[in-house]
Amino acid sequence: MHERFTVSQHISNGIVSASKKEINGCFNTHWHEFYEIEYIISGSGTYTIDDNEYEIKPGMIFFMTPVNFHSVQADNAKIYNAMFSGSICNSVYLSPLLQNHQAGVFIADENERRYIEAVFSQMTDKSNEGEFSLYIDCIAAKLCKLTSPFQENRSAVSQAAISYISQNFRNDISLTDAAESIGLSPTHLSETFKKQTGTGFKQYLNDLRFEYARKLLLFSEIPVSQVCSDSGFNDLANFIRRFTQRFGVSPSKYRKSHKENKE
């Protein structure tokens, strides 16, 4: 059974945890409720995210969302690690990193490495805890600049909505809930979100939920009924019907087919 990391387990203050550490050996596939950034200072190994393998090299940065399942095989790798709630990061920087619900894998050049290492050095200094939000924003902003394309044309409204969805998609949320969190009317949010992203609010939410459900089936052993509820769906029969329409097979057959292909 792959492990799910919760905020209460790994972030003592519930907001952010930053550390510099050395990892050596294998860390099995896991996923978590929060966001995570890992920066490779030195060392080698393999980082696997959603079945995609990446050779670890100094200067690499990995950005994981709650929808990404990952494992690490490291050989004396020194890293900076930051685990944080989405509420601490400005949605202007967080939103572009959530495009297509994929993990971010970046490689920094020499100048970028100096900057990123300086920010992480400050963030891991416990005397600077009051500035954690600023440091997370600095790292996220730098990653945005390394993202291609960087969606600078998105309004603050759609960026805030995307961040809200990413943090709350597992819950029973609606357009009205998101609008209230931003301070807008549902109609205004709906129109702006569609115009800026090309996707309706409900469709974006459902796309994220199905992507999460798909990965739960592939990388965990939890029952289909729990996959349904953990992904934000309330009706099991409706979930199975809609999953089958989207992927061509039922959830249980989708899982079985993946296992057979891995053997």
Image: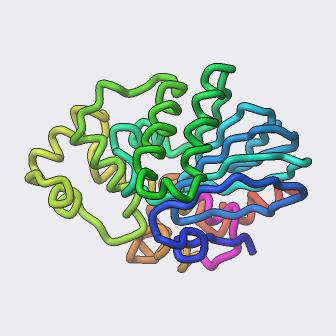
Residue 220 is left or right of residue 232, and the answer is: right
Task: Work out whether residue 27 or residue 210 is closer to the camera in this orientation and state it.
Answer: 27
Q: Please name the predominant secondary structure of the magenta segment in the image.
A: helix
Residue depicted at x 17% and y 55%: 179
Numbered label tally: 0
Q: Is residue 188 above or below residue 118?
A: below
Q: Is residue 168 above or below residue 35?
A: below
How far across and how far down the image is residue 220, in percent? 69, 69
How far across and how far down the image is residue 183, in percent? 12, 54
Residue 71 is left or right of residue 91, and the answer is: right
Report if residue 129 lies within the magenta region.
Answer: no
Q: Quadrant of residue 197?
A: top left
Residue depicted at x 63% and y 63%: 31
Please say whether residue 29 is visible from this viewpoint: yes
Which quarter of the rendering shows the C terminus? bottom right
Residue depicted at x 19% and y 53%: 182
Q: Tell me where the magenta segment starts and ends, as one range.
A: 214-223
Task: Work out whether residue 16 or residue 68 is closer to the camera in this orientation and state it.
Answer: 16
Please say whether residue 248 is visible from this viewpoint: no
Colour approach in the figure: rainbow
Task: Work out whether residue 42 or residue 101 is closer to the camera in this orientation and state it.
Answer: 42
Task: Work out whether residue 33 or residue 79 is closer to the camera in this orientation and state it.
Answer: 79
How far across and how far down the image is residue 23, in percent? 83, 55
